[in-house]
Amino acid sequence: MSEKTQTGLTQDELIALAGRHMIQNYRQQPVVMARGAGMELFDVSGRRYLDMTAGIAVCCLGHSHPALAESIAEQARTLQHVSNLYYIEQQILAARDIAERCFADRVFFCNSGAEANEGALKLARRYQHTVAGAPERNLIVSTLGSFHGRSMATVAITGQEKYRADLGPLIEPVTMVPYGDLAAAEKVLEQRTACAFILEPIQAEGGIIVPPAGYLAGLRELCSRTGTLLIFDEVQTGVGRTGKWFGHQHDGVTPDVMTMAKALGGGVPIGAVAATDEAARGLGFREGGAVPHASTFGGNPLACAAARTVIRVIEEDGLLANTREVGAYLGEKLDALAAAHAPLTTGTRGRGFLRGLALSRAAGPVYSACRERGLLVSVAGGTVVRFAPALIAGREHIDEAIEILDAVLGELGQ
Ligand SMILES: Cc1ncc(COP(=O)(O)O)c(C=O)c1O
C-alpha cells in the first residue's frame, strides 16, 4: 500500500526538490516519512519502520499520540501566540509542572536545546556580574566528548572538535576537562575563575557515556565550595528518558541550573532553563535596565500546552516505570548481542531508554542496513548504535528490533 504525500509529489520528486532548494548541510537517508503512529513510521511508499529513535529522543509519547494531538489542536483553536508582553496561562502552568518534578524553583522557556544552553550560559555569566559581584569569573568549563548544541556559544562549549571546525574565532574563555575525571575538574575549579561547569548527566551524542558513580555528587561539592554554578544539560536525558524525570535524579544530587528541550514538547519545539531561586537571579530583571533575556516564541501557548500534556501522559500512563523496566530489558538484550557479535561489538552502555551498542568500527553501515530492514536506530559518537525509543516501547518492540539488529550484525560481521 502506498501512503499519500501531502502534496501529491512522489518521494523521488521531493528528494530532487530538496537537492535543488535546501541548503546542503544534512546527510539524509533517502526516505520521506509520511505518517507516524505510536512506535511506527510509514514512508511515502507505504513502507513500515519500527522506530527506535523517536525523532532523536523527542517523540517520547510515540508518534501522533492522540492526547498530544488533541491538546495541540485544542490550543491552536484557542490561542497560539501572544508574546511575552503578557502573562501566558499555559506557560505559567508548564513552569509549575516542571518545578514540581525537580529541584528547580523557576523556569524560562525557549525553543530548542541550544537556545536553552545559551540561556543558561547567559544566566551564569550575568549571575557572576550582577549577583556574586565577580565579573572576572567568566570561564566556562565543559567536558571533552560533550555535545551542547550548534549555536556559536554552544559549539564553543561542545567538547568534540568536529563540531567546532571552520567556525573560529569561538567564544571564550572555555576550558574542557575529561568527562568523569573529578581531579581534573578540581584543578580548574580551584582557580576560582569559572562562572559555570556545564555537563550532561550521560553524554549522549558523544557515545552514551555514563560517568562513574559519585562523579556528579563530587562536582556538586566542588562547585558549591568554589562558587561555580553547576549546570546539567538534560536536553537529551531529561523528561523521562532514563526512567526518572531527569537523568541526574539517579545520582541524588541537584544542579543550580538545568536545561531541557527535545522530549519536553513530545514533538513540538520547546526548550527550557530551570533554576534555583538563587541562580535564577542571574536572569532577573532590574528596574531601569533592559530585559536581560527573552525569546519571542519562548513559552508560547501552543508549545506549553504540548509540554503540559507530555508531562501529564508520562505520569498517568506510568511511562517512567515502563522506561525503567523495558529499558532494563533492552539493556539485557543488547548485552546478549554484544556477547554474540564480538569482536564487531565491544560493549553496551546507557540507562533506561538511552542505550548504546558499541562497535569496533563505524556504526553508519549498521544504521543504514537496519533502515533497509525496517528498523530505525541512530548513531552516537561515530561507533555506537543508539537506541532512544519512545517511552511507550514494550518488550515486543524490543524483541523485533533486536532480531533485526542481530541479523544485520551477523551479515556485517562476516
Ligand atoms: C545534550 C544536548 N544538548 C543540546 C542539544 C542541542 O539541542 P537542539 O538540537 O534542540 O538545539 C542536544 C541535541 O542533540 C543534546 O543532545
Image: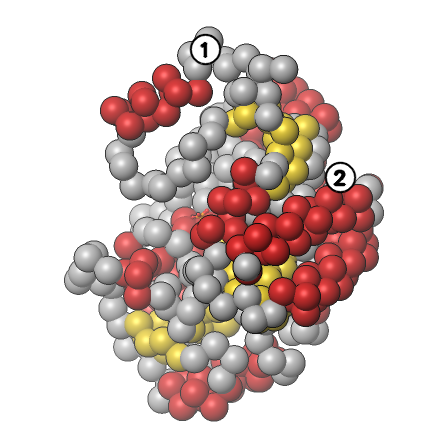
Identified by mark 2, the residue type is Val
Is 388 situated left or right of 65 in this image? left
The residue depicted at 59 percent of the width and 56 percent of the height is 409
Vertical relation: 194 (above or below) 169: below
Horizontal and vertical percent position of residue 312:
75, 40
Badge 2: how crowded within 10 Å, few (<14), some, or many (20+)?
A: some
The residue depicted at 39 percent of the width and 54 percent of the height is 149
Q: Nearer the viewer, mark 2 or mark 1?
A: 1
Is 285 situated left or right of 175 in this image? right
Rounded to the nearest whole Å, what is the CA distance between mark 2 and mark 1?
32 Å
The residue tagged 1 is 7
Q: Secondary structure at mark 2?
A: helix
Horizontal and vertical percent position of residue 252:
70, 73
Q: Earlier in the sequence, mark 2 or mark 1?
A: 1
Vertical relation: 305 (above or below) 332: above
Vertical relation: 210 (above or below) 264: below
Regarding residue 104, the answer to whether it shows in the image is no
The residue tagged 2 is 313
Report the residue that reaches farthest toward the front.
Answer: 414
Give residue 29's quadrant in the image.
top left
Identified by mark 1, the residue type is Thr
The residue depicted at 64 percent of the width and 50 percent of the height is 407
Q: Nearer the viewer, residue 210 or 118?
A: 210
Q: Secondary structure at mark 1?
A: loop
What is the number of the mark on residue 104?
none
